[in-house]
Amino acid sequence: MEHVTVSAARRTEVGKGAARELRRQGLIPGVVYGGEGDAIELKLDPKQVVAILRSEKRTNTIVELDVDGTTAKTMVKDFQIDPLRRTLKHVDFYRLTPGKKVTVKVPMSYDNTLVVAKAGHQLRTFEREINIRCLPEEIPTAVSLDVSQIPLAKNFLIKDLQLPAGLEAVYKNNFALAFIKPVVIETKAVVAAAPVKGKKK
């Protein structure tokens, strides 16, 4: 389970002017909400959050948020990037409730694609990530699908995806994850030539 600590302080001044002043100081505004506590306005070093967003699990990382010495398990719920400077502007943290499942987006990993390619088949994948529901500590880095084991010439649907215990795919309408177009082997019929009757001498 990937787990990091982020330190923050309470922020008393809010508004665009206060946010600009924070950024001049090398900090960014943020907020934590959800769970059993009240919403708290924050100020923090953006480098801590950037490190999370660049990690393997990104926003699915469990964050031990320390606000003036009081800690809570959270996850990054949302963040804003400056469209011109491409720097982090704001971050939202969501408190986790012990024993309560969360719904998150997890990347799809299509495994053994080389096996399909070597057989001459064409693989098409349709989804880069899917929604799953599970306990925060059970969120996987990715959901794997062994494409060498799926049927040919038939859509492999989300309902057919086998997930580890504790994980549940969340969707309203069934949809395809992958399709393998089988190789077509052309066969030519061999026609035997009829014997030519020769003239009798």
Image (cartoon, grey):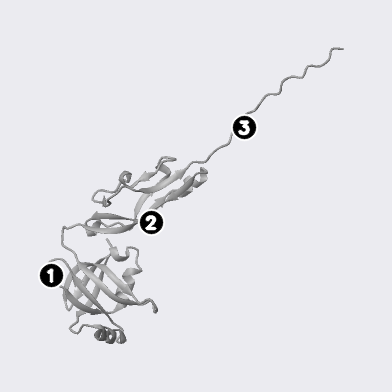
Q: In the image, what residue type sits under mark 1?
A: Gly
Residue found at x 32% / y 57%: 106
For label 2, the residue is 128
Residue found at x 33% / y 76%: 88
Q: Secondary structure at mark 3?
A: loop
Circle count:
3
Q: Position of residue 47 (x, y in %)?
A: 32, 77
Q: Earlier in the sequence, mark 1 or mark 2?
A: 1
Residue found at x 15% / y 61%: 98
Q: Is the Cβ of the residue at disc 1 closer than 8 Å to that at disc 3?
A: no
Taking depth in this image into account, of 125 and 51 the one nearest to the observer is 125
Q: In the image, what residue type sits under mark 3?
A: Lys
Q: Quadrant of residue 90?
A: bottom left
Residue 1 vertical placement versus 117 (above, below): below
Q: Quadrant of residue 48?
A: bottom left
Q: Position of residue 197 (x, y in %)?
A: 78, 16
Q: In the image, what residue type sits under mark 2?
A: Arg
Residue 134 vertical placement versus 200 (above, below): below
Looking at the rendered image, the disc whose residue lies closer to the viewer, 1 or 3, is: 3
Position of 17 with respect to 108 (left or right) is: left
For label 3, the residue is 188
Q: CA distance from mark 2 to mark 3?
A: 40 Å
Q: Secondary structure at mark 2?
A: loop
Label disc, if present, on residue 37 of the rendered structure: 1
Is disc 1 surrounded by few (<14), some (14 to 19) or many (20+) residues within 10 Å? few
Residue found at x 30% / y 45%: 159
Q: CA distance from mark 1 to mark 2?
A: 34 Å
Q: Earlier in the sequence, mark 2 or mark 3?
A: 2
Of all residues shown, which one is farthest toward the top? 201
Taking depth in this image into account, of 177 and 65 the one nearest to the observer is 177
